[in-house]
Image (spheres, grey):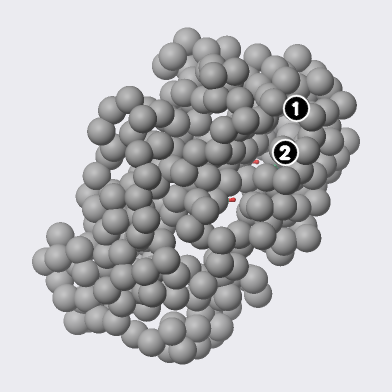
Amino acid sequence: MIMVTGAHGQLASLTLDELNSRGAQAVGGSRTAGDGLRHLDFDDPGSLDFEGVSTLVLVSAGYAEDDRVITRHGAVVSAAVRDEVAHIVYTSLTGAGDHLGFALAHRATERLVKTSGLGWTILRNGLYAELFGALLAWSPGGLESAFGTGALAAVARADLAAAAAVVAAEPASHAGRTYELVGDPISADDIAGRLGVPHRTISLGEYRARLLSDNALLPFQPPMLVSTATGVRHGFLDGTSDDLATLVGRPLTDPLTIAADTAASTRAGQL
Ligand SMILES: NC(=O)c1ccc[n+]([C@@H]2O[C@H](COP(=O)([O-])OP(=O)(O)OC[C@H]3O[C@@H](n4cnc5c(N)ncnc54)[C@H](OP(=O)(O)O)[C@@H]3O)[C@@H](O)[C@H]2O)c1
């Protein structure tokens, strides 16, 4: 049986949909119990039960400081070893993202997975096109961001879910492999152009100041977001790879359309 963690999350739920459409026997794990879901909270090791699971799709549970994320992922790997899971598929971060503020937790988890003694596949996911679109801010004059003219090899979340399902359905064919799952590079100017509005670049200092004054953000988030902005702005996240199209066996979803649609959908809320 395949289990996908974070079942109420967007990537995991799309992955479960993909697996179900392929007729694979897959179950979701979630902090919130629901139809056909197993209760699974990485912060509560007692809840980690992988009995009967042969392939575990470990969807990263970020959104916390590194020590907390690495502890939660470590607890999952230990429980998978105990319960004799055969193969772990871990959704990591693209290699080009090594300098990003949240890279360490991914690389530490990759180490845990690779040294677990279990079969493994690492999916080094690129940044979502949905995320890129959502990180552009609306002003009365159009879009603003600290991305400058830099491009991001953005990828539709649904394509990453399709890749995860392909690998989870036949893990032996992907054992010991690390895939770089990125899309076509797009820039904030491209997104603004698609929407027919101007894009104004703000400095990294102004961006950081705006983030620091946003009470809705947790302390680790401003440095994480600024590292993403500087990475894109200075051309460190635009490298391409054929891995994703090869895995899913079809042309990729256009990331520009996804990013532009996401940016457009945030307009009413921000103006
Ligand atoms: N590549 C990118 O651009 C990008 C962007 C943002 C995040 N990420 C990473 O990729 C992951 C998946 O992305 P997404 O878009 O699906 O995020 P999402 O919609 O926010 O889903 C994240 C899910 O992680 C699960 N989770 C969180 N804390 C957990 C815990 N303590 N124990 C067990 N599960 C926990 C939750 O699932 P349940 O609600 O079912 O418990 C949550 O819904 C994120 O968690 C994050 O690590 C990647």
Do the residues under discs 1 and 2 have CB atoms within 8 angstroms? yes
Q: Quadrant of residue 243?
A: top left
- Between residues 127 and 180, which one lies in front from this camera angle? 180
Residue at mark 1: 118
- Which quadrant does the N terminus fall into? top right
Residue 30 in picture, x, y percent from top left: 66, 35
Q: Is residue 241 left or right of residue 1?
A: left
Residue at mark 2: 113
- Between residues 243 and 130, which one lies in front from this camera angle? 243
- Residue 95 seen in render: yes
Image height of 28 relative to 126, above or below: above
Q: Secondary structure at mark 2?
A: helix
> Which residue is farthest left?
196
Tell me which label, 1 or 2, sits earlier in the chain: 2
Residue lying at 37% horizontally and 78% vertically, measured from the top left: 146
Q: Secondary structure at mark 1?
A: loop
Q: Quadrant of residue 113?
A: top right
Residue 195 in picture, x, y percent from top left: 16, 62
